Image (cartoon, rainbow, N blue to C red):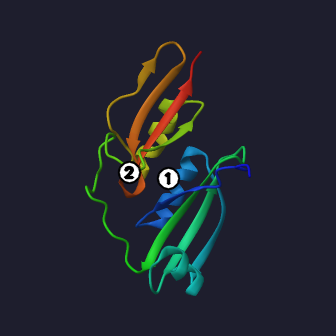
């Protein structure tokens, strides 16, 4: 048996429209939306009465996707801690390669993005930064320079 691909990474968000706008601003494309509920969802998730809205976002080359999920029932639980730092155990961050890191950061600021530190140069090959995005997740950006 061989692994075929990583299909997607799911992110639970409070405001689905805002998350779609945020990741759209990075350059992801909305692939589609759906409501998910019913016995199969309850059984997969191990929860009762699941009712969610999801949006599938894909990178332009088609090789990566994010599933943005808004829980209506049961209610989403707050993260602990609510604004985890980059060295917190678990899902660390999602990184995107961009053409112009300064332009991308500027376009994301109106969507609530906050730099965790600053844009830095790594050797002569990349400019990198970490910022906080929807639901407090950490989004990293990388601009290849060399």
Placement of 2 over or under 51, stated as above or below: above
Instruction: Looking at this view, name the residue that lies furthest to the front.
Output: 1
Label pair 2/1, CB-CB below 8 angstroms: yes
Q: Which residue is mark 2?
A: 112
Q: Which quadrant of the view contains residue 130? A: top left
From this view, report whether residue 101 is shown above or below residue 38: above
Q: Is residue 128 left or right of residue 80?
A: right
Question: Is there any visible trace of residue 63 in the rendered image?
Answer: yes
Crowding at mark 2 (Cα within 10 Å: few <14, some 14-19, many 20+)? some
Mark 2 vs mark 1, CA separation in Å = 8 Å
Furthest residue toward left: 81
Q: Residue at x 30, y 65 (%)?
A: 78
Q: Is residue 110 left or right of residue 65?
A: left
Q: Tell me if mark 1 has few (under 14), some (14-19) or many (20+) residues whose alpha carbon lies within 10 angstroms of its own.
A: many
**Disc 2 element:** loop
- Give the structural element (helix, strand or loop) at label 1: helix
Residue 38 visible in the snapshot: no
Mark 2 or mark 1: whose residue is earlier in sequence: 1
Q: Residue furthest top?
A: 124
- Please name whichever residue, 20 or 45, is drawn nearer the observer in this view of the structure: 45
Image location of residue 56, percent across then percent down: 62, 62
Relative to residue 93, is residue 76 depicted above or below? below
The disc label shown at residue 22, or none: 1
Q: Position of residue 23 (x, y in %)?
A: 54, 51
The residue at 60%/30% (across/down) is 99
Q: Position of residue 21 (x, y in %)?
A: 52, 56
The quadrant of the image that shows the C terminus is top right
In the rendered image, which quarter is residue 66 located in? bottom right
| Relative to 125, residue 50 above or below | below
Would you identify the image quadrant in which residue 92 lies? top left
């Amino acid at each position: 048996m061989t692994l075929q691909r990583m299909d997607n990474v799911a992110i639970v968000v409070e405001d689905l429209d805002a998350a779609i706008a945020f990741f759209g601003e990075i350059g992801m494309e909305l692939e589609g939306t759906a409501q998910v509920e019913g016995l199969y969802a309850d059984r997969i998730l191990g929860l009762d009465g699941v009712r969610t809205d999801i949006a599938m976002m894909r990178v332009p080359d088609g090789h990566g996707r994010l599933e943005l999920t808004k829980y209506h029932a049961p209610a989403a639980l707050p993260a602990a801690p609510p604004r985890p730092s980059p060295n917190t155990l678990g899902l660390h961050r999602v990184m995107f390669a961009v053409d112009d890191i300064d332009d991308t950061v500027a376009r994301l600021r109106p969507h609530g993005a906050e730099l965790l530190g600053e844009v830095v140069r790594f050797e002569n090959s990349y400019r990198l930064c970490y910022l906080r995005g929807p639901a407090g997740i950490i989004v990293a950006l990388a601009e290849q320079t060399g």
